[in-house]
Image (tube, rainbow, N blue to C red):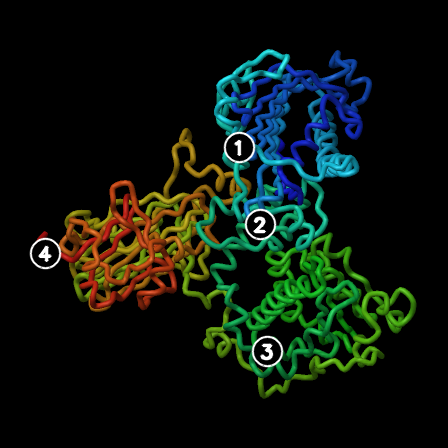
Amino acid sequence: MVQKYQSPVRVYKSSFELIMAAYERRFPTCHLIPMFVGSDIMNEFLSEDGAVHVVERRCKLDVDAPRLLKKIAGVDYVYFIQKNSLNRRDRTLHIEAYNESFCSRIVIHEYCCYTVHPDNDDWTCFEQSASLDIKSFFGFESTVEKIAMKQYTSNIKKGKEIIEYYLKQMDDEGITHLPRWTPAPKQLQECPTSTSTHSVSPAQNIPTITTSDGHGSRDGPPTSSSPPEALSSTPDDKLDADYIKRYLGDLTPLQESCLIRLRQWLQETHKGKIPKDEHILRFLRARDFNIDKSREILCQSLTWRKQHQVDYLLSTWNPPQVLHDYYAGGWHHHDKDGRPLYVLRLGQMDTKGLVRALGEESLLRHVLSINEEGLRRCEENTNIFGRPISSWTCLVDLEGLNMRHLWRPGVKALLRIIEVVEANYPETLGRLLILRAPRVFPVLWTLVSPFIDENTRKKFLIYAGNDYQGPGGLIDYIDKEVIPDFLGGECLCEVSEGGLVPKALYRTPEELESEDIRLWTETIYQSASVFKGAPHEIVIQIVDASSVITWDFDVCKGDIIFNIYHSKRSPQVPKRDALGAHGITSPVCNNVQLIDKAWQLGRDYSMVESPLTCKEGESVQGSHVTRWPGFYILQWKFHSMPACATSSLPRVDDVLASLQVSSHKCKVMYYTEIIGSDDFRGSMTSLESSHSGFSQLSAATTSSSQSHSSSMVSREPLPMSDSVCPSLTHPQDLKSNPDGLLRLSPSFWGQHFSTLYTLRPPVFLRWPPSWRLPFIREAVGTAAIETESSDSTT
């Protein structure tokens, strides 16, 4: 397995020239790095104007490894080749290194870069990446990997200390400023002199030979190659070490690397918004910084958040009055560590009455809103206290807990809430203080504890009776001034006292079902299962020609083929059996087949779109402008890949490969809408700002916008002129393609158009009258500005 490392951006508050002078003092050896025995210059090149200086060294390392392992390998030292390419004109230093010893058994590649800070010319940025691939090593592969990772991480920690040590040494010598490089006078350049006593060779870059698995390898002498672009600049979206320490906490170098790599993966696979760094870090901690496992549960959680619109919960959820009156829980100041404090008087709460009056789903939604509020308060306290706060403390008072609380439906609701919170809010509970636990508590704990993660259980502190009042009790975790009054403190706690819910507020299961309060169904999306030989189909009746059918769907499991058909005949919805396809029970009736087996393609119905193959994890948005009235059938059909086929989305496959899904079952989550011909004015199906990027799992989002009626659109692009686009006044609103056609920026849309449909892409817009209703299209190819055809013919 290839081990990779990616550092955050490390910032030195010193000029590039001072950092370079400090860096040069590390050679030929450095007493601060005991394993660095020495180095010899192999090649050196200095340009005529002195701007470019390339040095290639052979470095000798004394690796701290067991003597037996060194004896088996037959060496006492290992050798690395390091090439430094300094460009004084651009103020950059690129460092590449690879192992010379055991290069056929072990492949090590490191790339470092010093650049000027993008916002301050007097500061310097440093980035570092490395990869380790142990192919074979006399049966000690695992041992060598551990030794290599240990040695490398220890040197990473010393890296900044070493530079700062030599900066201080220079400061003691009175060197506090070095001038920037400037071109030499012309007359001096005509007679260049070389100060190097070593052999001179042209500047070369160490090659990275990309293998089939995407990892670099070294074989043979260096040849010309360009350094990776990933570290050649410092874009704003990169994480720097100071930011990580201030807002995320003290992380080890490998933990920082995992965070940066997972964040980079999300940036590549999500076209828009990505989760906050704190959110990503929680999922990494929940899986002990195993990137593959963290990525899997994070992707599942993002899909869940999108499906149930959890991002909008705080602004849309209005708790019923019953919760205000009888739910005995609420936020109450913070603990000694600055964590938000949530108080829950579970013993005073009538769980049975709440479930009977509200239903399980409303209680779950309320708990989710509490967790969302907790995330917001953590972010707020991080800014207030000046240190990272990523979790909260929960204080649970069990006085009054009895057998009534062990009512089976109530326990079932509690277990489901725990399951959902554990899956989607990992590492948010910093500490759980359980006070005044009665004798019945062990029974409840036995039922609940198996559903709680082991790391979470370690955060539980349980006190029986009044033990919480003594040493090691509540006073150790909460300031005396904020201990609630009902626990003997002086602070008035505004949390409801709970009490029995009046039976007059109870509702029957039928009433709860008819209220449409179920969280899982209160969403614009619908879920459907697609089986081998049993596609899922929906019918849309179109009365007016030139209407627009829009769709947005995610392929949650398996690969499917998406088709659109038209028929003048109304398909008959078949009667459903107790068992679905293949004898599988389908309680939600989420597989419907409408096309009669007796129908013939071309006679009874026709295909109006080319089939679209969609991979697992893809999000697909698109639209179809209808040409005839009648019945349009949208079909999701099972697609089986050939055994020898390879996936076009390797990153997503890596994430989802471990999921245990049926080879004959797919699942899609879809939403459709019809826009009438009177309201339709245009569509842009791949507008980047409209993508549901927070939940996209695929490396490339598929946009299907191939079929718009040719009778509506002229193929001649309009020339860009004041008469055509009178509202375009800012050059930044335009992006020109190589063929001269133009694309409008997302900010321009918001300034000049009123939206008809913005819930899900594609986005439909009403145009200003001065534009004479142009139709703007951005398809798979180039974007163009086009006008409606006055004499439309087909």
Closer-to-camera residue (427/733): 733
Closer-to-camera residue (69/674): 69
Location of mark 4 (residue): 792
Crowdedness near tag 3: few (<14), some (14–19) or many (≥20) residues, C-alpha within 10 Å = some
Closer-to-camera residue (188/81): 188
- SS class of the residue under badge 2? helix
Q: Are marks 3 and 4 in contact (CB under 8 Å)?
A: no
Q: Is residue 450 left or right of residue 690?
A: right
Location of mark 1 (residue): 89
Q: Position of residue 339 (x, y in %)?
A: 72, 64
Type of amino acid under label 2: Ile
Crowdedness near tag 1: few (<14), some (14–19) or many (≥20) residues, C-alpha within 10 Å = some
Location of mark 2 (residue): 297
Type of amino acid under label 4: Ser
Location of mark 3 (residue): 356
Q: Are marks 1 and 3 in contact (CB under 8 Å)?
A: no
Type of amino acid under label 3: Arg
Q: CA distance from mark 1 to mark 3?
A: 74 Å
